[in-house]
Image: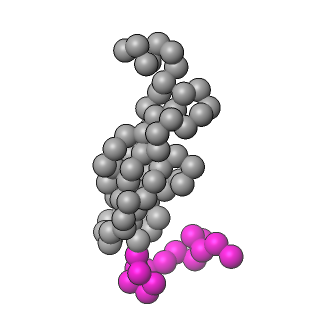
Amino acid sequence: DALRRIGVEEIDLKVGDTFDARTAEALTTTKDSTIPDGAIASIFERGFMLRDQLLRAARVVVNHHPEGSQATDPSDSIQ
């Protein structure tokens, strides 16, 4: 409660959110066909911000589909 009063907030991350290296640290990868490639598969530790400054990055597992193992939507390709 004391930390909340001075402005410390938990980083809002959920399984399925896109991994962002600015707020999270990838510990490892996993293969899960139900979650998009590059999305967070699980969260080991929550991360925290103080106003706009990162205090502790969230520690997460990132989903990775090996090339060719998932049907791709042409609108999802980045070129």
Q: Is residue 29 above or below residue 61?
A: below
Say how the picture is coloured: one colour
Q: Is residue 28 magenta?
A: no
Q: Between residues 52 and 13, which one lies in front from this camera angle?
A: 52
Quarter of the image for residue 50 reads top right
At which x and y percent is residue 41?
34, 58
Task: Quarter of the image for the N terminus: give it.
Answer: top left
Task: Please give the name of the residue rendered at 60% of the width and 74% of the height, measured from the top-left corner.
Answer: 77
Task: Please give the name of the residue rendered at 38% of the width and 46% of the height, measured from the top-left corner.
Answer: 14
Q: In this view, does 36 lie above or below 16?
A: below
Quarter of the image for residue 31 reads bottom left
Q: Which residue in the rendered view is the most extreme toward the right?
A: 79
At which x and y percent is residue 66?
41, 81
> Which residues fall within the magenta stretch?
65-79
Q: Which residue in the rendered view is the most extreme toward the bottom?
A: 68
At which x and y percent is residue 12?
45, 38
| Any part of residue 18 in sight | no
| Any part of residue 46 in sight | yes
Task: Please give the name of the residue rendered at 68% of the width and 76% of the height, measured from the top-left corner.
Answer: 79
Task: Please give the name of the residue rendered at 54% of the width and 54% of the height, measured from the top-left corner.
Answer: 21
User: Which is the main secondary structure of the residues drawn in magenta?
Assistant: loop
Q: In this view, does 67 lie above or below 62?
A: below
Please give the count of numbered marks on the rendered protein: 0
Quarter of the image for residue 36 reads bottom left
Q: Does the magenta stretch include residue 69?
A: yes
At which x and y percent is residue 28?
36, 65
